[in-house]
Every structure is written in structure tokens, then in C-alpha cells.
Amino acid sequence: REDLPTYTLEEVLQHTTMEKRIWVTYGQGVYDITDFIPQHPGGSEKISMAAGSSVEPFWMLYGVHKNPNVLAILEKYRIGNLSPAEAAEATANMEDPYARDPIRHPALKPSSKKPFNAEPPPTLLTESFVTPVDLFYVRNHLPVPEISENDYKLEIHFQGKDYSFSLDDLKTKFEQVTVTATVMCAGNRRGEMTEIKPVKGLNWGHAAIGNATWSGPRLSDILRYIGVKENDPSIQHIQFEGLDHDVSNVPYGASIPFNKAIDPKGDVVLAYEMNGEVLSKDHGFPIRAVVPGTVGARNVKWLGRIIVSDVESDSHWQQNDYKGFNPSVDWDTVDFSKSPAIQELPVISAICSPDSGSVVKLNSNSSLNMKGYAWSGGGRRIVRVDVTADSGKTWHSANITAQDSSKEPHHWGWSLWSIDLPIPQGVREVELWAKAVDSAYNTQPETFANIWNLRGVLGNAYHRIRVQVAS
Ligand code: HEM
Ligand code: MTE
């Protein structure tokens, strides 16, 4: 790298437009990233914010960049160096935006610490129907915002007017309900998809999912209270904004279809309690939108604003992320405007016990106890979980050991299952598969090969693990 020219910060600052080319710095390196901008997975607008300066303050906020993959991409665009003194100056006075994040339970295994993203050991998931708050996976895109209960206000924008509700209003003006709902990240099980081909995204295992009870007023009641009419054709989407925001004050945002929001049976809740406890900082204190049956990304935490609208949220996470594509679409050909934003999730299941790769002891009748979860979006009930120990020659249906008692199609919580599966005599290694069937008779695809997508979402192929049989 010494063979490259040395530039000054002043020179870098001249390069902030596509015509003059866009330069950025990282450490001592100077990079011309003009050609990478259209391919940036975080969008061309975001990356352009660093034009003419250091990417580091932004990367402190978006910790996904602190990995060798991203640095390897950046190195391809290196054109020169800063002097050591100027490199130090470029990042002076940087404060860690994550310094005030809460302390987490050490059992949560982080795939990224800043922002904090972590899942519990999968074997714990099947121990209780309701996942303990401290062991519930966390998926944050930004630092956890600090919000005081007394100052908190929920703003709602509807037909040119703004309405405001205090926490007390939300707790006292409306009927309070408790809904059992599973929340799952669209990237749950992404790790298995990356075995086919790498994807851009956090490497989740199969525990980016949890089941909880959520209490608070129904969104549909609040919307009706401010005069929203169920059959108003001008309303198509309900947008949510979080109080977590990036360096340019852009909040986390998402939207859901109006029909889901206004339907009292859609059970969308503005929750201030999770499992009967005050909502924790990581899960959205003081208010979070819980949208049962819908992908985690739309369950907006630290809810600050609701917009009643004819259009979807224009947020990066609604428009340019959390969408599916065909397996041949890559970062050169992807057009995010061509795919709908994920809302209801497809049917999924996973084996939580035994652990993949473990050594297992068989029961005296040569069977093996297996446990797992199964869930489907849209309130569809799990009607069956099929498992096999011989690659599908013989399938056995597991016992559903826990399921919420709601009626079809409002089955928002997951199902837990268990089976003593017969294992062929004498085998030393066995591959176990599981697949679930929901009440619409949707089932899971056999392999990840044909559902691979560049963002690594919707990974619901049969779950397959290998275990060694103890002699
Ligand atoms: C995501 C590369 C600059 C904001 C990503 C990802 C890559 C990448 C590879 C996908 C990571 C993953 O999900 O695993 C780069 C490179 C940059 C750059 C090579 C060089 C200049 C920036 C800047 C910003 C930014 C300056 C912000 C101002 C984001 C955001 C995401 C992202 C918001 C999406 C994060 C998420 O899904 O939560 N970037 N980036 N990037 N980037 Fe960048
Ligand atoms: N809401 C806000 N305000 N900010 C976020 O980063 N992440 C979303 C969603 N709501 C997010 C958010 C995503 S992608 C998921 S999967 C869920 O929250 C995770 O919820 P949890 O952390 O409570 O498990």
C-alpha cells in the first residue's frame, strides 16, 4: 500500500459528487467508491453521506461493516493513503453511539454487538411455551434509544392532523388486551442458506424467533378513536416510525397493510408489557407495535409515530431490505422495487434438541427424543410436524406438546413438538429432518438450494441436523 499516493483530507473533501468521483477514508486508506455506490446493500443514499470524509462515524452506528467481507470490498477501491497525523485527525472526537445500550444476558450469543443482534441457544427455546424476556432474541439496527416514561408521546398523523397520546392515555383510554404472538426475524436460519452460497446479512442460526404474551391497547381501537374509517379507500398502509434513528436523524421505519391494522381480529397491539413485565429496553420500551403473524421487521420497537397513509413506509427496511428474490438475482441485477415487502411469513420449523453435531444416547427401545418448534405466519395453525431419520423413507408425525388456544386464523403463537423417533439399529451417525404443515396445507421446501436469495431471508427449508449415536 506504500506505493499508492498520499492525499490530504482537504483533497479527499473535493470528491463528493459522482462527476468529481466520490472518495472516502477509513483508517489510513483513501478510497474511490463511486462504482460501488449503486451496489451498496444499505442503499446509495446512505453510503453517499460519507462522501469526502471518513466512513468510521457511520460504521460505528452500522456495525455490520466491522467484518472482513466489507473490508475486503473496500480494499478493492483503494487509491491512496492519508498521512498518519491526518488519519488520526479524521476520527478524533468520535463517541460510541452504543455506549448507553443495556446490559444483556450472557446466554444470548451475539452475531453483532453494535448494533446488538443475538439469539439464545436453540435448546432453551423448547423448554417453555413463552420465551423468557432475557432469552428472547434481539435484532436492533441502531443504538437503543433512551426514552423517559414521563416525556413519552405517541404521535399519530392522519389527514393533515397530528394526534398525541401519553403512555397513560394508551394504558387507560382503551380496552387492554393480551395477545400471544411469535416474533421471528426474516433472517432466521440464514446460516443454513449461506452453506449454498454466501449472502449479505447477519449469520443467524435457528433461534432468531421467540414466543411471548404482549399487552396493551389494540391499534384498531386507537385508529377508530381518531376517526379512521374501516372502508376509507384512501387509506392503504399504516406506517410506523421508531425513536431509534441514524446520524442523519432518519428513524427505523416499516409499514403494514391497512386491513391488518384496522381489523380488530388482526390483533395488532401497541404493547407496553411482554410476558406480564414492563417491556424491556431491547424489546421496545415503552411501546412497541406487535403485528401478529407478520415478519419481525414490521413489529416496530420504541414506537414514536404512526402515519395513516395511502403509501407504504419509504424506509430503507421497507423498500430495500426484507424482500425475497429468485435465486439467480444477484447484487448487479437486483431491483428492489420489483418485489413486495415481506409481511406474513411462510411456515417454518426447527429441531432444537438434540443439538446439531452432538453425541446422543438412544432410549432403551432404540428411539431418540427430539424437540422443536413450528410456526406459520398469517395466523395459520400448525397441523402437523413430520420428522424422519432415514432421509424420508419413513416419516413420523411428532406430538404437538404446546399450542395456543386461539381460533383459526388467529393462531399467532408457535407450536412446540416432541417425539421419540425410532432410529435404525446399529447406525453411528444419523441425519434428522423436520418439516411442518400449516392449516392451509402449506409445507416447507426440501432444500435451501432453490429458495436461496441474496439477502438470505425466508429460509424455511426442511431443518436437517446430524448427530452421532453413542455406543
Ligand atoms: C450494509 C458495504 C458505507 C450504511 C452494508 C453491507 C455491505 C456494505 C457489504 C451488507 C452487510 C450485511 O448485511 O452483512 C459498505 C461499504 C462501504 C459502506 C464497502 C464503503 C464506503 C456505508 C456508509 C453508510 C452505510 C457510509 C451509512 C451512512 C449501511 C446500512 C446497511 C449497510 C444502513 C444496512 C444495514 C442493515 O441491514 O441493518 N454495507 N458500506 N454503509 N450499510 Fe454499508
Ligand atoms: N424496531 C425498531 N425501532 N428498530 C429496529 O431495529 N428491528 C426489527 C423489529 N423492530 C427493529 C424494530 C426487526 S428486523 C426484528 S426481527 C424485530 O424488531 C426484532 O424484535 P426483538 O429484538 O424484540 O426480538
Image (cartoon, rainbow, N blue to C red):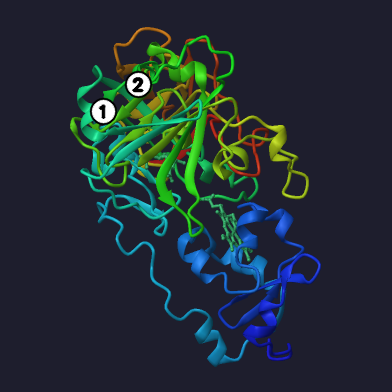
Looking at the image, is 204 positioned above or below residue 326?
below
Secondary structure of residue under mark 1: helix
Quarter of the picture for ligand 2? Answer: top left
Q: Which residue is mark 1?
A: 170
Nearest the eye: 276 or 328:
276
Query: Tag 2 or tag 1, which sits nearer the N-term?
Result: 1
Mark 2 CB within 8 Å of ligand 2? no
How far apart, in angstroms, are the residues tagged by discs 1 and 2? 9 Å
Q: Are marks 1 and 2 in contact (CB under 8 Å)?
A: yes
Looking at the image, is 375 positioned above or below residue 95?
above
Q: Quadrant of the N terminus?
A: bottom right
Q: Residue at x 62, y 87 (%)?
A: 82
In the rendering, at what x and y percent does residue 197 appear? Answer: 65, 48
Numbered tag placed on residue 222 in the rendering: 2
Numbered tag placed on residue 356 in the rendering: none
Q: Residue at x 59, y 39 (%)?
A: 314
Instruction: Kindly tell me whether residue 348 is visible in this rendering.
Output: yes
Nearest the eye: 225 or 294:
225
Looking at the image, is 53 positioned above or below residue 199?
below
On the rendered structure, is 15 left or right of 253?
Answer: right
Q: Quadrant of the C terminus?
A: top left
On the rendered structure, is 366 left or right of 252?
Answer: left
Type of amino acid under label 2 = Ile
On the rendered structure, is 382 left or right of 364?
Answer: right
Type of amino acid under label 1 = Leu
